[in-house]
């Protein structure tokens, strides 16, 4: 059996029982932008090609994370994932939305997928892993020229489950709809607040609002089953922003963490503004959209726990100036370490 088929066999036979682990755990999320397996070839139109040195440096960052579970986004294929994470050290599982050979399609037809890299040292047996297809919605909007409807799927989520110190931990890896980073969701704007023109992001916001409802359902179901919830990924939402203008309250986090039912409370991180990821770049994102959200009960059990964002370490390198930083990624890893 080739290693590619082996990866798929493992992903399809996710274990029925969840192996138990102890002594805390380290969970990371990382969007490795448009990760393709070929040197010198961009994954999709408009993305950036990587050189061998870039894959080497990405691998070094991955190793330095020293994480037990890494939730990944924008992965082009299992072969791409294996260029960053060593198969001898990690179980590598890509969303089942990927089909063998997808990476060989023309660039305009290639896609990006969620994935997991799971430490074999920490998990000799693969935990229960599944794709959560509910988050792959058919997003409907106008084409850029406004002449026709465009329909394309959003990314699916992935779910991993295991026991930690006698409790079931349920982790969801998400990559939510982009282009609605701060606009209201409770009442999606149909007209631009400033010029009264049709609001271009209304399509994106409606899709994100639908994903928010699904996410809230997923969290509440896991909690009702007495599982401790962690959601990690690229939320494409500035969850730390309180207000922009009177019509743009950050209601995603308010809806998700409303304390209902039964006083369910969540914590998110990192808080504040981003001072770590490409700090010397003028056009960088200053607000976090890559985050980890966790059941507050976990912090009571693991009082030394905390969130951390980790820079990629090449801020002064000319080869990564401005947009060329995507040769590594324009996103940086975020880690939650549960420790007592």
Image: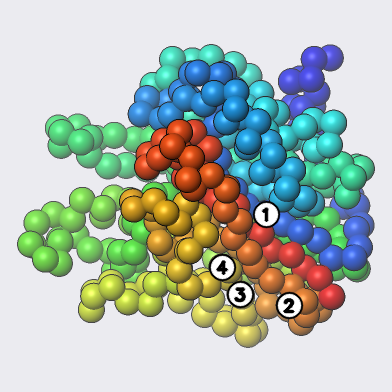
Q: Which quadrant: the N terminus?
A: top right
For the point 48% across and 18% down, the residue is: 41
How far apart marks 4 and 3 lie (CA) works out to 10 Å
Q: Residues within 10 Å of mark 3 (few under 14, many from 20)?
A: some
User: According to the image, label 1 marks what residue?
Assistant: 28
Disc with the residue nearer the chain's start (3 vs 1): 1
> Mark 4 packing: few (<14 Cα in 10 Å), some, or many (20+)?
many
The quarter of the image holding the C terminus is bottom right
Viewer-proximal residue among 183 and 338: 338
Q: Residue 168 appears in which quarter of the rendering?
A: bottom right
Please say whether residue 192 is visible from this viewpoint.
Answer: yes
> Which comes sooner in the sequence, label 1 or label 4?
1
Read off the residue under disc 4.
270
| Contact, mark 3 vs mark 2 (Cβ under 8 Å) | yes
Q: Which residue is mark 3?
A: 267
Give the spatial CA distance, label 1 vs label 4: 12 Å
In what element is the residue under mark 4? Answer: loop
Quadrant of residue 26 within the rendered picture: bottom right
Give whichever of discs 3 and 2 has the lower sequence position: 3
């Amino acid at each position: 059996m080739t290693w590619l088929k082996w990866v798929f066999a493992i992903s399809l036979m996710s274990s029925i029982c969840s192996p138990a682990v102890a002594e805390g755990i380290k969970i990371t999320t990382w969007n490795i932008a448009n990760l393709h397996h070929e040197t010198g070839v961009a994954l999709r139109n408009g993305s950036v090609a990587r050189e061998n040195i870039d894959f080497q440096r990405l691998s070094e960052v991955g190793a330095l994370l020293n994480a037990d579970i890494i939730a990944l986004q924008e992965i082009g294929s299992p072969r791409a994932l294996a260029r960053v994470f060593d198969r001898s050290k990690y179980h590598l599982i890509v969303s089942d939305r990927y089909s063998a050979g997808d990476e060989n399609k023309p660039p305009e037809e290639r896609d990006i997928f969620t994935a997991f890299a799971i430490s074999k040292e920490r998990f000799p047996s693969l935990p229960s892993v599944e794709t959560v297809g509910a988050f792959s919605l058919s997003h409907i909007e106008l084409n850029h020229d406004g002449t026709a409807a465009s329909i394309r799927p959003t990314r699916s989520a992935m779910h991993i489950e295991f026991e930690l110190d006698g409790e079931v931990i349920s982790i969801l890896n998400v990559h939510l709809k982009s282009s609605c980073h701060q606009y209201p969701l409770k009442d999606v704007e149909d007209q631009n607040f400033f010029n009264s023109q049709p609001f271009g992001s209304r399509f994106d916001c409606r899709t994100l609002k639908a994903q928010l409802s699904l996410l809230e359902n997923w969290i509440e179901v896991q909690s009702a089953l007495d599982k401790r919830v962690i959601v990690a990924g690229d939320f494409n939402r500035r969850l730390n922003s309180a207000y922009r203008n009177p019509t743009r309250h950050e209601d995603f986090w308010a809806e998700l963490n409303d304390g209902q039912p039964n006083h369910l409370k969540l914590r998110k991180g990192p808080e504040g503004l981003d001072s770590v990821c490409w700090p010397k770049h003028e056009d960088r994102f200053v607000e976090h959209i890559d985050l980890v959200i966790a059941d507050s009960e976990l912090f009571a059990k693991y009082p030394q726990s905390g969130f951390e964002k980790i820079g990629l370490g090449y801020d002064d390198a000319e080869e990564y100036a401005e947009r060329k930083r995507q040769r590594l990624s324009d996103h940086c890893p975020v880690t939650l370490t549960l420790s007592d």
